[in-house]
Image (spheres, rainbow, N blue to C red):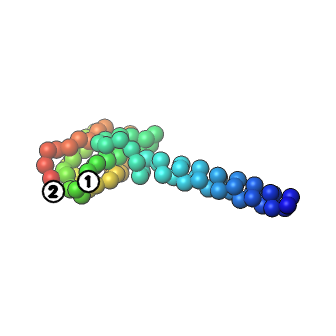
Amino acid sequence: MRVRRLVTSALGSVALVLTSFGTVAAASPATTGPCGFYETGSDAFYRHCTTDDSRVVIKVEVARARDYERCVGHGTTWLGSARKIQGAHYAGRTC
């Protein structure tokens, strides 16, 4: 009986730890985040939120270099270093 409680308790602890790791992984900025442009401590991202799998053109504003346009699909797109990328916004058209 005592062994059964010990094993059950250990399995419950392991399940709790694994669940918390899954929650942390699911909340990482590369997989989720606000719609549009956002930055983490070191990286810049653009998240296109859509339910129809459309692709849109965004204008990326770059520090000390030419701005450029990029076609992005549903989800999060890494744009580069947060030190280099100043912003990004929807250019008003699909691609």
Could you say where residue 76 lies in the image, as x and y percent from the top left?
34, 51
Identify the residue at horizontal 75%, vertical 58% (top origin): 8
Residue in front for this viewpoint, 69 or 19: 19
Toward the right, the furthest residue is 2
Identify the residue at horizontal 81%, vertical 57% (top origin): 6
Say if 8 sits above or below 85 in the image. below
Amino acid under disc 2: Cys
Toward the left, the furthest residue is 93
Residue 14 picture quarter = bottom right
Q: Residues within 10 Å of mark 2 (few under 14, many from 20)?
A: few
Secondary structure category for the residue under label 1: loop
Say if 34 sits above or below 56 in the image. above
- Is residue 62 at all visible to an observer of this figure? no
Residue 88 picture quarter = top left
Q: Distance between the Cα atoms at labels 2 and 1?
A: 16 Å
Q: Which mark is residue 51?
A: 1
- Would residue 6 be found to the left or right of residue 54 on screen? right
Q: Residues within 10 Å of mark 1 (few under 14, many from 20)?
A: few
Identify the residue at horizontal 86%, vertical 58% (top origin): 2
Could you say where residue 3 lies in the image, as x and y percent from the top left?
84, 61
Q: Nearer the viewer, mark 2 or mark 1?
A: 1
Work out whether mark 2 precedes mark 1 in sequence or the reverse, and give the earlier one: 1
Residue receiving disc 2: 95
Amino acid under disc 1: Thr
- Is residue 4 at all visible to an observer of this figure? yes
Residue in front for this viewpoint, 26 or 13: 13
Q: Quadrant of the N terminus?
A: bottom right
Residue in front for this viewpoint, 39 or 36: 36
Identify the residue at horizontal 59%, vertical 50% (top origin): 20
